[in-house]
Image (cartoon, rainbow, N blue to C red):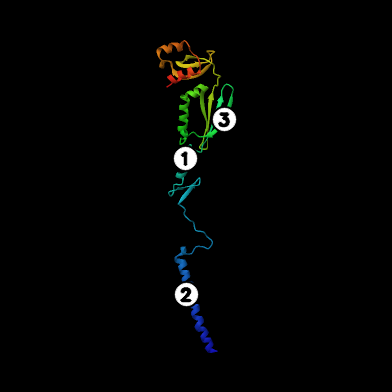
């Protein structure tokens, strides 16, 4: 019995000492290096500074400047593109009717921002094509502007053309009158002083134009 007891003590004693030593060492590490042991179940914060996605397109973002890509994206949104819907309203000012046409944006407007588009429309209003003048064009309005859709209203004073016309003067500008010599058919934009002296006198006295073809030839010759 004494022999068995001696053997048991021989094995138990070292195990107890090793256990005490391990626990003491573990306590020492926790004391001097508390950050080495994260609490179980606690997720450590992760830093993200790679890419910010704006409208499904990745944009690289420098640290601390998340606002910059958004400003750039909003600037791009103010520009017309090939997918912009072009809505044209043609209004008859005399009958108060409106005809709407929806189509693709004309290529000449692609890439324009709001300011450039408005200035382009202002120039068009000041110098409309001859074909528009003949239709009775009197002005336009930009109803709305967005990258998705642009709405422009063209205003007309539609008149039934007569067989013959008269050229007259109003505020030093040559105008076209219908056969009644009262109804203005076209504001030509041609200044009286731009015409030869002989024609100026005839226009002042109202120059008769026999038909639409003769009128077109005159306007084409003297329109700038």
Give the mark nearer the N terminus: 3 vs 1.
Answer: 1
Closer to viewer: mark 3 or mark 1? 3
Q: Observer-nearest residue: 161 or 56?
A: 161
Q: Quadrant of the C terminus?
A: top left
Mark 3, Cα crowd under 10 Å, few <14 / some 14-19 / many 20+, is few
- Position above or below: 30 against 175: below
Q: Residue at x 57, y 28 (%)?
A: 99
Q: Position of residue 161 (x, y in %)?
A: 54, 18
Mark 1, Cα crowd under 10 Å, few <14 / some 14-19 / many 20+, is some
Element type where label 3 sits in the image: strand
Q: Position of residue 139 (x, y in %)?
A: 51, 24
- Position above or below: 56 against 95: below
The residue that mark 1 highlights is 76
User: How many labels were placed on the picture?
Assistant: 3
Q: Residue at x 40, y 12 (%)?
A: 197
The residue that mark 3 highlights is 100
Q: Observer-nearest residue: 17 or 162?
A: 162
Closer to viewer: mark 2 or mark 3? 3
Q: Residue at x 51, y 26 (%)?
A: 140
Q: What is the distance, in whole Å, between disc 2 and disc 1 at their CAs?
A: 68 Å
Q: What is the distance, in whole Å, between disc 3 and disc 1 at their CAs?
A: 28 Å
Q: Check contact, mark 2 vs mark 3: CB within 8 A.
A: no
Q: Position of residue 144 (x, y in %)?
A: 53, 32
Element type where label 2 sits in the image: helix
Which label sits on residue 21? 2
Element type where label 1 sits in the image: helix
Q: Position of residue 86 (x, y in %)?
A: 52, 34
């Amino acid at each position: 019995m004494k022999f068995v007891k001696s053997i048991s003590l021989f094995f138990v004693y070292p195990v107890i000492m090793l256990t005490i030593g391990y626990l003491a060492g573990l306590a020492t590490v926790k004391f001097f290096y508390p950050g080495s042991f994260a609490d179980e179940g606690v997720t450590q914060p992760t830093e993200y500074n790679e890419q910010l996605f704006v409208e499904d397109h990745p944009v690289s973002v420098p640290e601390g400047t998340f606002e910059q890509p958004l400003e750039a994206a909003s600037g791009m949104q103010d520009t017309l593109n090939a997918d912009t819907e072009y809505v044209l309203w043609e209004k008859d000012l005399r009958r108060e009717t409106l005809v709407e046409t929806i189509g693709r944006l004309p290529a000449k407007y692609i890439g324009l921002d709001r300011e450039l588009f408005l200035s382009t429309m202002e120039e068009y209003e000041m110098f409309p094509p001859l074909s528009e003048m003949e239709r009775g064009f009197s002005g336009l309005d930009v109803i709305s502007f967005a990258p998705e859709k642009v709405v422009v209203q063209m205003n007309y004073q539609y008149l039934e053309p007569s067989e013959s016309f008269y050229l007259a003067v109003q505020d030093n500008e040559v105008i076209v009158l219908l056969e009644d010599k009262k109804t203005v058919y076209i504001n030509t934009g041609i200044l009286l002083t731009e015409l030869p002296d002989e024609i100026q006198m005839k226009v002042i006295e109202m120059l008769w134009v026999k038909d639409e073809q003769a009128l077109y030839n005159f306007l084409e010759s003297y329109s700038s």
